[in-house]
Amino acid sequence: MSLPVKDGARDWTAPLIPGGWMAWSFPTAMFFLTIFALLACMAVWEYARPGGHPRIGILRFETTRGDRLFISLLGSAFIHLAWLGLSDLSLWWALAVSILYAMVVFRTV
């Protein structure tokens, strides 16, 4: 499907299926597709290199790759919520902070 057009411009937040039972907008669909893609990449990574050897990081308990993915997704959600509540800047900056946070989590946790 293509994005809806309103007044000659693409309406990024309009429902993709007008009158549908759920208001799937483009950002919502991209969010869920990104989560699915991350899980699929983790599954391929686990298939290619099984085990992942749990390790003890700065949190002082064993974590696997899946644990670190979960911690980074959970932290990213809190970063975005705090960004929405405390800042007027674009959410693209929150995404950049979340990516940096995920890189730190995968390296140190």
Image (spheres, helix red, strand yellow):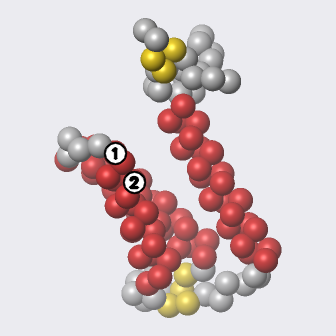
Q: Which residue is mark 2?
A: 95
Q: Which residue occupies 45% across, 73% down?
A: 103
Looking at the image, residue 42 sits to the left or right of residue 96; the answer is right
Residue 48 on image: x %, y %: 79, 77
Where disc 1 sits, the SS reads helix
Residue type pointed to by label 2? Leu
Asked if the residues shown at circle 1 and circle 2 are in contact, with their CB atoms under 8 angstroms apart, the answer is yes
Looking at the image, residue 28 sits to the left or right of residue 99; the answer is right
Residue type pointed to by label 1? Leu
Work out whether residue 49 can be spotted: yes
Give the residue at the far right of this rendering: 47
Q: Which residue occupies 68% across, 67% down?
A: 42
Residue 34 on image: x %, y %: 59, 50
Tell me the tag on residue 6: none
70 w.r.t. 59: above or below = above
Number of numbered callouts drawn: 2
Q: Which residue occupies 27% across, 51% down?
A: 82
Where disc 2 sits, the SS reads helix
Q: Callout 1: few (<14), some (14-19), or many (20+) C-alpha neighbours within 10 Å?
A: some
Q: Callout 2: few (<14), some (14-19), or many (20+) C-alpha neighbours within 10 Å?
A: some
Q: Quadrant of residue 41?
A: bottom right
Work out whether residue 78 can be spotted: no
Q: Which residue occupies 57% across, 23% down?
A: 3
Give the residue at the far front of this rendering: 8
Residue 102 on image: x %, y %: 45, 68
Q: Which residue is mark 1?
A: 91
Looking at the image, residue 11 sits to the left or right of residue 89; the answer is right
